[in-house]
Amino acid sequence: MNIILLSGGSGKRLWPLSNEIRSKQFIRLFKDEQGEYESMVQRVYRQIRTADPEANVTIATSKTQVSAIRNQLGNAVSVCVEPMRRDTFPAIALAAAYLRYEEGVGEEETAVVCPVDPYVENSYFENLKKLDELAKNGEARLVLMGIEPDSPSEKYGYIIPEDKEFVSSVKAFKEKPDTATAEGYLAQGALWNAGVFAFKLSYVLDIARRAVDFEDYRDLYLKYDKLPKISFDYAVVEKEPSIRVMRYFGEWKDVGTWNTMAEAMADKTKGNVMLDETAENVHVVNELDIPILVMGGKDMIIAASGDGILVADKERSGSMKPYVEKIVTDVRFAEKSWGSITVVDAEPGSVTMKVVMKPGTRMSYHSHELRNEIWTVLSGRGMTVVDDMEQQIGPGDVVSVAAGCRHTVIADTDLTLLEIQIGSEISAADKKKYELNGALFIDDAPDRWNE
C-alpha cells in the first residue's frame, strides 16, 4: 500500500507549544505501547506499520517541517517537500509525481491520501487497506472514506451518499453547516469528510498535466508555482462524476484545538505540575523548568513553553487563533534532524541556546560572516571540525569559531552543548554550506536559528 500523509499546519491552534516550526503533529502528548511519550506523527506512523508493515509511506510537507519529521521518524519514510505552500491539490500532485518518478511506482498502482494527524484506533488503518482495494478494482476513479458522525457537528464538511450501504456512490458534498442543517444531513446517512481518499496515480497525474505540462517529478517541482493554488476537494473531488465513498465506524477525532487535544492526551498533566484536590477537568502541559501549581481551577487548559503561557477555558480555547496571530515572538524551541535547540536568552547582538544532539548525527558544514560562536560542552562526546581541523570534545571543552570559519559538530554519544552566538546580525540568511569529506550534508530545513 502506498500512503501519502499530508503534513501541514501553521502552528497557531496549539500555541504556545506549537509554532511556525513545530506544528501540532510534532508535540509529544500521547503514549505508545511502552508508555513513552509520542507525537501524532509518530502515533500515526506506528499504527500504519501495525496495519501494513510493508506500506510505502511518503509525507508531503513544507520545508520547515522536514527536520522535525527526520528527528521523530528518522529515514524510515520518504519526504516530498513543497518548494512553496500552494494548498492540497498541488501538494498531492507533487507527491503523486514523486511516487511515480522517484520511487518507481507504476502509474496504474494506487495511493491512499490522508492527514498526518487524526486521533484514531488501529481499525482506521485496516480500513485504509480496504479503501486501497476499492481503488485498485477500478469501479470508480476516486474512492473516499467518510467518517460515521456521532453528532450533527458544525466543524466538518459532509459527504451525502446515494444510500446507507458500506460502500456507496456519492450524491453531493456539503460545506460546514449549522447544527439544524447538519441534523438533516445525518437523516440522509451523511458522513463527515475527513480528507481521506484513494486513486490510481495516473488519475491525478493526468489532472495535473492538464494544468501544467511536465515530464517528471523534478520538472514539476521546478514548475510548482504554475499549479493552481486550490484544495484537492475543489480541484478534483467535487468535479469527479465517478466517485464512491466507504463508511468508517470507528473512533476518529480531529485534535486541532486544545479542547479536543485534552480529550486525547495520555495524562492530565505533563511536566513540573501540581493540581490541588479541588481542580476539576484541568489539563496542564509545562515545558518550562519552573513548577506550575493550579488550585481551584475548573474546565481549564494551561500550557507553558519558552514561546509563552496559555491559561484558557477549554471551550474558549478553540477561538484563540486571532489572538495568537497578534503575538510577535521569536521561536524558542525547534527540532532538528540531528536533535533540538532551545533558546535560553536572546538580546540584540547575542543569542544563547542549549543544543542537544543524538549519537551518530552531525550538523551541516557551514560558515557565518556576521557572527562568532562559542561552544561549551556540557555532556557527551564528539568532534568539531573548524576549517577542516578536527578536535575531539568532551565535558568542559570550549571551542571558539570566528566569523567566516567553516565549522560543524559531530556527536559520538548523546551530546549537549551551550552555544553563544555574538554578532551584528544573527539570522538564517547568514549561512553558507560546504562539502565535508567530499559530501554536501544538507540539514533538512532552515529555521530561525539556522544551525
Image (tube, grey):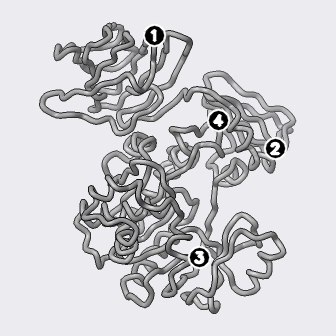
Of pointers 3 and 4, the one earlier in the residue sequence: 4
Of pointers 2 and 1, the one earlier in the residue sequence: 2
Secondary structure of the residue carrying tag 2 is strand
Which marked residue is nearer to the observer: mark 2 or mark 3? Answer: 3
Q: Is residue 275 above or below residue 136?
A: above
Task: Return the residue at label 2.
Answer: 313
Q: Amino acid at mark 2?
A: Asp
Task: Return the residue at label 3.
Answer: 146
Disc number at residue 135? none
Residue shown at 62% from the left, 29% from the top: 307
Disc number at residue 424? 1
Which marked residue is nearer to the observer: mark 1 or mark 4? Answer: 1
Q: Amino acid at mark 3?
A: Gly
Secondary structure of the residue carrying tag 4 is loop
> Which of the two residues, 172 or 79, is positioned nearer the viewer here?
172
Disc number at residue 16? 4
Q: Would residue 272 be visible to someone looking at this image? A: no
Per the model, the C-alpha gap separating discs 2 and 1 is 43 Å
Per the model, the C-alpha gap separating discs 4 and 2 is 15 Å
Q: Is residue 347 above or below residue 147?
A: above
Q: Amino acid at mark 1?
A: Ser
